Image: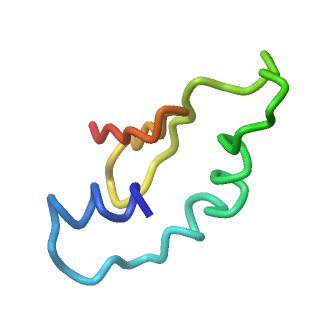
Amino acid sequence: MRVLEAIADREPAELEPPLYEAVNPEALDDLFAPTGDGDPSRPERVTFRYRGYDVTAHASGDVDLA
């Protein structure tokens, strides 16, 4: 949801194409889900293209658009 909120803040229109055409939102959530064991193989961030932006989703929950 934070990715969609970040894009909507810049472009308050219907978001097409859907986010799932750029990245699997459930997999993105799972990637940053807490493991409880401090798994060091978890990434700190993931970057992908969506609606002309380079979207960086951080493990902290922050989203950057460039």
**Horizontal and vertical percent for residue 22?**
56, 61
Q: Residue at x 27, y 37 (%)?
A: 66
Q: Residue at x 64, y 51 (%)?
A: 28
Q: Residue at x 45, y 41 (%)?
A: 61
Front position in the image: 40 or 23: 40
Indicate the quadrant where residue 14 lies.
Answer: bottom left
Indicate the quadrant where residue 41 lies.
Answer: top right
Q: Residue at x 37, y 42 (%)?
A: 63
Q: How many numbered marks are there?
A: 0
Left or right, residue 30 beside residue 5: right
Left or right, residue 35 beside residue 49: right
Q: Quadrant of the N terminus?
A: bottom left
**Horizontal and vertical percent for residue 54?**
38, 41
Residue reaching furthest top? 40
Q: Is residue 10 above or below residue 61?
A: below
**Horizontal and vertical percent for residue 29?**
64, 53
Q: Is residue 14 above or below residue 7?
A: below
Specify the color scheme: rainbow
Residue reaching furthest front? 36
**Horizontal and vertical percent for residue 43?**
67, 26
Q: Is residue 60 above or below residue 27?
A: above
Front position in the image: 37 or 64: 37
Indicate the quadrant where residue 11 lies.
Answer: bottom left
Left or right, residue 47 beside residue 30: left
Residue reaching furthest bottom? 14
